[in-house]
Image (tube, rainbow, N blue to C red):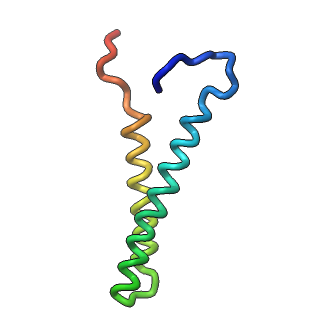
Amino acid sequence: MAGKTDSGDPWVGVSAGWAVSSYLLSAVVVWGGIGYLLDRLLGTPKVFTAIGMVLGAGLGTYLIYLRYGKEDDTKKP
């Protein structure tokens, strides 16, 4: 996002790719872990784990949209 980008550099988008992958993976792990803890607490058979992982994937995707997908409103044509 910040800094100069060289169009001839083959490594230009690598950091954004790693960041996106990290956001998605960490969201699924964190929310899946919260669901796992709820399952252990309530004695349910991995119901909240699955719900937490799906919720984490959705929230991770939304976070990526907020971070990288929105257009910058400060740019004027």
Q: Is residue 61 above or below residue 8?
A: below
Residue 54, compared with residue 45, is above or below; it is above
Vertical relation: 1 (above or below) 16: above
| Residue lying at the far bottom of the rendered structure | 43
Q: Quadrant of the C terminus?
A: top left
Residue drawn 41% across the image and 55% down it: 58
Nearest the camera: 59 or 36?
Answer: 36
Point out residue 21 in the picture as x, y percentages from the top left corner.
55, 48
Q: Residue at x 41, y 40 (%)?
A: 65
Labels in figure, total: 0
Determine whether, in the image, residue 7 is placed left or right of residue 25: right
46 with respect to 11 (left or right): left
Check the image and report above or below for 20 versus 3.
Answer: below
Q: Where in the figure is residue 11, as x and y percent of width and height?
A: 66, 28
The residue sitting at the top extreme is 77
Q: Find residue 16 and report its image quarter.
A: top right
Q: Quadrant of residue 12?
A: top right
Quadrant housing residue 14: top right
Report x, y in % for residue 31: 41, 65
